[in-house]
């Protein structure tokens, strides 16, 4: 949303109902960037950048907002005391408490479609951040029991329907060829929830880690006539690259101050020979620098991470326990070893030294509590 690593904005963890902070004003959002050049802006779904009035989307460049200010598991639940009601917000007003979450995906979709139809004759930016498939899972009666993959499959089927409705609305109002649609996710699967958490496939670990299973997520971009269909872009990119890329495509002026993201338009358009504009990407957990990636190489620094106890996942909404494991100074070649099974640090000392040097530069900029650098 800001083109910056989260710790540069001061947000080091998921903000819950007790949080007093949010995204600081000095960090310009994509919505603010586009609103300044005449775009209508709307956000639908989970915000999670501050629930207090001064941090809501309507204070950060969005003309309209409808959704939950944080995760759907942060409301009242059995065994947890003194947790406030989960608020459903429209604009800057709470319109319901502890809403029926089975209706959220449909309601979000309806709001998104309405916004598209209402603003078809002017430029707009619409950000849809579905609450599902975050646990606890909820699905409407229309899709309940309809998949062959249980509740999680039903939820994903409904999300697929939602994407289809939004794309159809864009086509129906005649702006298909002039609209860039990006579909992505925030993190890998919550493995402790088993059949309610998804799968990382061949990738190592999942949500809550900086292994590929935690940070490598789907990214699909669609722009008929501009982005070639049925193509795969092998170069890495991050969501921090969205703000500068959107600025380039729309002619918006980049905000003052340091940005971590870079314009990836050549990658997005799948131009011949396009390469990542980044020398490296950095993977922080809170304020700990866990790893750095440059090209196919990913170097991890010594840290602890969570992994399923005994490799056994939970089921049907009940999570399994995690245990803490430790990783040393380890190097992986993601082109040859996507599952990160073979540490090749000892065989590639020059690569290790180069990536360590890049990491040291970033530590001077953003800090690293593992090295006691603020």
Image (cartoon, rainbow, N blue to C red):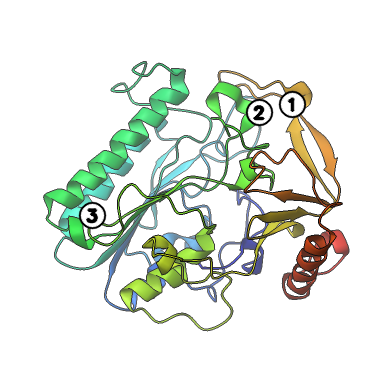
The location of residue 19, given as percent across then percent down, is 63, 54
Q: Is residue 231 above or below residue 278?
A: above
Q: In whole angstroms, how far apart are the C-alphas of marks 2 and 1? A: 7 Å
Left or right side of 214 for 49: left
Q: Which quarter of the image is occupied by the C terminus? A: bottom right
Label ID, residue 192: 2
The location of residue 346, given as percent across then percent down, is 87, 51
Q: Are marks 1 and 3 in contact (CB under 8 Å)?
A: no
Q: Which is more toward the observer, 242 or 13?
A: 242
Sequence-earlier tag: 3 or 2: 3
**Visible in this render: residue 363?**
yes
Q: Which residue is mark 1?
A: 321
Q: Is residue 169 above or below residue 145?
A: below
Q: Is residue 29 above or below residue 118?
A: below
Instruction: Please tell me whether mark 1 sits on a helix, a strand or a loop.
Output: loop
Sequence-earlier tag: 1 or 3: 3
Left or right side of 311 for 77: left
Q: Which residue is mark 3?
A: 115
Left or right side of 84 for 88: left
Left or right side of 274 for 310: right
Q: Which is more toward the observer, 21 or 217?
A: 217
Instruction: Determine crowd level at label 3: few under 14, some 14-19, many 20+ residues with C-alpha closer than 10 A.
Output: many
Sequence-earlier tag: 2 or 1: 2
Look at 36% across and 36% down and name the residue there: 104
The residue mark sitting in front, 1 or 3, is: 1
Instruction: Determine crowd level at label 1: few under 14, some 14-19, many 20+ residues with C-alpha closer than 10 A.
Output: some
Q: Are marks 2 and 1 in contact (CB under 8 Å)?
A: yes
Look at 36% across and 35% down and name the residue there: 159
């Amino acid at each position: 949303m800001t083109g910056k690593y989260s710790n540069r904005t001061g947000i080091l963890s998921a903000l819950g109902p007790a949080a007093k902070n949010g995204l600081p004003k000095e960090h310009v959002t994509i919505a603010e960037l586009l609103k300044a050049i005449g775009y209508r802006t709307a956000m639908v779904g989970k915000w999670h950048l501050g629930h207090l009035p001064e941090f809501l989307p309507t204070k950060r460049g969005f003309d309209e907002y409808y959704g939950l200010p944080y995760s759907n598991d942060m409301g009242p639940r059995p065994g947890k005391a003194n947790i406030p009601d989960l608020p459903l917000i429209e604009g800057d007003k709470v319109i319901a408490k502890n809403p029926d979450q089975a209706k959220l995906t449909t309601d979000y979709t309806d709001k998104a479609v309405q916004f598209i139809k209402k603003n078809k004759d002017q430029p707009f930016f619409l950000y849809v951040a579905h609450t599902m498939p975050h646990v606890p899972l909820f699905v409407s009666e229309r899709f309940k029991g309809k998949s062959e993959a249980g509740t999680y499959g039903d939820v994903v089927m409904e999300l697929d329907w939602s994407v289809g409705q939004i794309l159809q609305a864009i086509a129906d109002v005649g702006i298909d060829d002039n609209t860039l649609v990006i579909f992505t996710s925030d993190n890998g699967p919550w493995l402790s929830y088993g059949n309610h958490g998804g799968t990382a496939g061949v990738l190592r670990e999942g949500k809550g880690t900086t292994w590929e299973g935690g940070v490598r997520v789907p990214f699909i971009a669609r722009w008929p006539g501009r982005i070639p269909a049925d193509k795969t872009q092998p170069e890495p990119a991050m969501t921090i690259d969205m703000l500068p890329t959107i600025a380039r495509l729309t002619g918006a002026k980049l905000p003052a101050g340091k940005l971590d993201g870079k314009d990836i338009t050549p990658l997005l358009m799948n131009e011949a020979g396009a390469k990542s504009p980044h020398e490296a990407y950095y993977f922080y957990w809170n304020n700990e620098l866990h790893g750095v990636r440059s090209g196919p190489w990913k170097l991890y620094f010594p840290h602890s991470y969570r992994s399923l106890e005994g490799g056994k996942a939970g089921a049907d909404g009940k999570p399994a326990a995690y245990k803490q494991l430790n990783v040393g100074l380890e190097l992986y070649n993601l082109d040859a070893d996507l599952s990160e099974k073979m540490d090749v640090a000892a065989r590639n000392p020059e690569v290790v030294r180069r990536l360590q040097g890049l990491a040291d530069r970033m530590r001077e900029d953003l800090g690293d509590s593992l090295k006691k650098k603020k």
